[in-house]
Image (spheres, grey):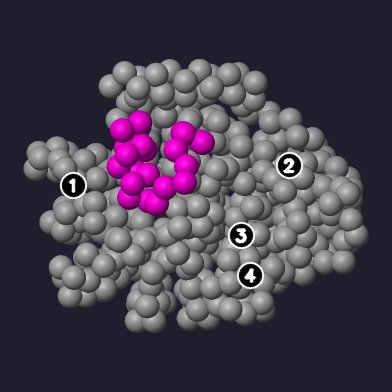
Amino acid sequence: MDTLCITGGRVLHPDGRVREGDVVVDRETGTILAVGRDEAVAEHAADAAGTLDATGGLVIPGLVNAHTHVSMTLLRGYADDKPLDAWLREDVWPAEAELTDDDIEVGAELGVLEMIRSGTTAFADMYFATDRVADVVDRAGVRARLGHGVVTVGKGEEEAIADVEESLAVAADLDGAADGRVRTAFMPHSLTTVGEEHLREGIERAAAEDVPVHLHANETRDEVDPIVEERGERPLAYAADLGALGEGNFLAHCVHVDDAEIDLLAETGTAAVHCPASNMKLASGTAPVQRLREAGVTVALGTDGAASNNDLDLFDEMRDAAMVGKLAADDASAVPAGAVVEMATAGGADALGLPGGRIAEGEAADLAVVDLDRPHLTPVHDPVSHLAYAVRGSDVRHTVCDGRVLMRDREVLTLDADAVKARAAEAASDLVARVDEA
Ligand SMILES: CSC[C@H]1O[C@@H](n2cnc3c(O)ncnc32)[C@H](O)[C@@H]1O
Ligand SMILES: [Zn+2]
C-alpha cells in the first residue's frame, strides 16, 4: 500500500478536541487510514512510503472556501471603499467585460496558489470560463464545486437564454473532471440580476438532473427591498417558490434574513455561506450567524472574491466571523471559536457536498498542518482558540488534498509560484490598460 504518514503533531478531531497523534493516509484512494498513536497506527507509520513532519504543529482538516470568484484576484485592490451596487456597476462589471479566458485562468492560478498556501483544499466558484478554472483545479490538485454565473438583466432574450443554457451545460460537462475533484452547480448570480422565467427554467432543469443550485441571496437591503416591494414576499419565500431551496443547494451571504427565512433555510436543508469580510468591506450588513446556527442551518464560510476582501485566507474569515458574530448578537459568547472552525471545515464540506472537512478513518485525506511554534501563537492554552483568533494563513506548513502533498514546508509543489505571480501581475496590468481605453 502507498501510504503517507503525518507524524509528531497534534490532531483536531471532528468533536473539536485536540489530541496528540499521527495521521496515516492511503495515497491510492486519497483517504485517511488511521488516526492516533496506538499500535495499529505505528505499524502503518513504519510501512509509510512518505512522511510529513508535524512536530510542534496541529493537523487540521483542509479548509473549505464555500463562496468565491477565484479569478477576481486580478482585481484585488482595483476598486475599494464603495457599496456593492456602485462597486459592481461602476468598477467591477466594466473591468470584467474586458476579461479574456486566459486572464480567468491566470487569476484562478493565483487564487488557488494563495488558497493552498493558507491551508484551503476546496472551494466553490461562480464565474466565467469555467473549463479554464477546472483545468487549474486539476493541475493544482485541489477540489472545487464550480459553476458558470448567469446574469440576464440588461441582456436581450436570446443572450439571456444562452447564458442559462451555458450554466446548465457547464454543470453537465464538467461534473467529475479532475478525477472527480471537480463537481458542479447551476449558478444564477442572484434573485435580482436574473429574470424570474430564467430562474424558474434553469432551477427546474438543474433539479431534474440533481445539479445543486448556488446564488447570492439577501446580501444587501438594496437587493431585498425591491423584491419585497414588487412581489409582496421576502426573497427566500420567492427562492422557495422557484425551487432554489433544498438539500445540496447553498446561498451566499444571507445577511438580511428574517426569522421566517431562517426557518425556511433550516426546514429545506439549504446551507448558508457567511462572507464576513466582504459584508464588512461593502457595508452590506451583519449576518445573524448565531441565529442561523441555533435554527440548525448548515453555515459555511466564504471569502467572496479577492476584490471585496481583499485576500483568500480563511483564517481571516474565521476571526472575522467570530468577531462580527458577537457584535451582531450583542453577545460575547455568540459564534465561539469552535463554531467558526467547524464552519470553515465540516460546515464547508457539507454545504458544498464535497468530501473532506473531518479527520477520521475513511474520510478524504484533505489536510493542513499549522505550525504552532511561532511567537504570535505562544503559549498554546487552547489550539482551537488559536485557529479562530490568532493563526494566519502563512502559519500553514503543509497542505494535502486527496492524499497528495500540494505544499511541503511552504513550497507549493503543483504550481510554480513565481511564474504564477509574474503572469498574474502582467495580465492584471494589461486588463486595466484595456479598461482605461474602452
Ligand atoms: C456572474 S459571475 C459572478 C459575479 O458576481 C460578482 N460579484 C463579486 N462579488 C459579489 C458580491 O459580493 N455580490 C454580488 N456579486 C458579486 C462578480 O464580480 C461577477 O460579476
Ligand atoms: Zn460573491
Disc 2 marks a residue whose amino acid type is: Ser
Write down the residue under mark 4.
339
* Residue 218 is a magenta residue: no
Q: Quadrant of residue 19?
A: bottom right
Q: Quadrant of residue 386?
A: bottom right
The prevailing secondary structure element of the residues shown in magenta is: helix
Image quadrant occupied by the N terminus: top right
Name the secondary structure under disc 3: helix
Q: Is residue 66 visible?
A: no
Residue interval drawn in magenta: 75-96
Crowd class of label 1 (few under 14; some 14 to 19; many from 20; radius 10 Å): few
Image quadrant occupied by the C terminus: top left
Name the residue furthest left: 157
Q: Which mark is residue 320?
A: 3
Disc 3 marks a residue whose amino acid type is: Asp
Q: State yes or no: Cβ of the residue under disc 3 lies below 8 Å from any atom of ligand 1.
A: no
Percent of width and height locating residue 267? 38, 79
Q: Could you tell me how many numbered marks the image carries?
A: 4
Choose the circle earlier in sequence order: 4 or 1: 1
Write down the residue under mark 2.
394
Residue at 70 percent across and 42 percent down: it is 399
Name the secondary structure under disc 4: helix
Write down the residue under mark 1.
153
Disc 4 marks a residue whose amino acid type is: Ala
Choose the circle earlier in sequence order: 3 or 1: 1
Choose the circle earlier in sequence order: 3 or 4: 3
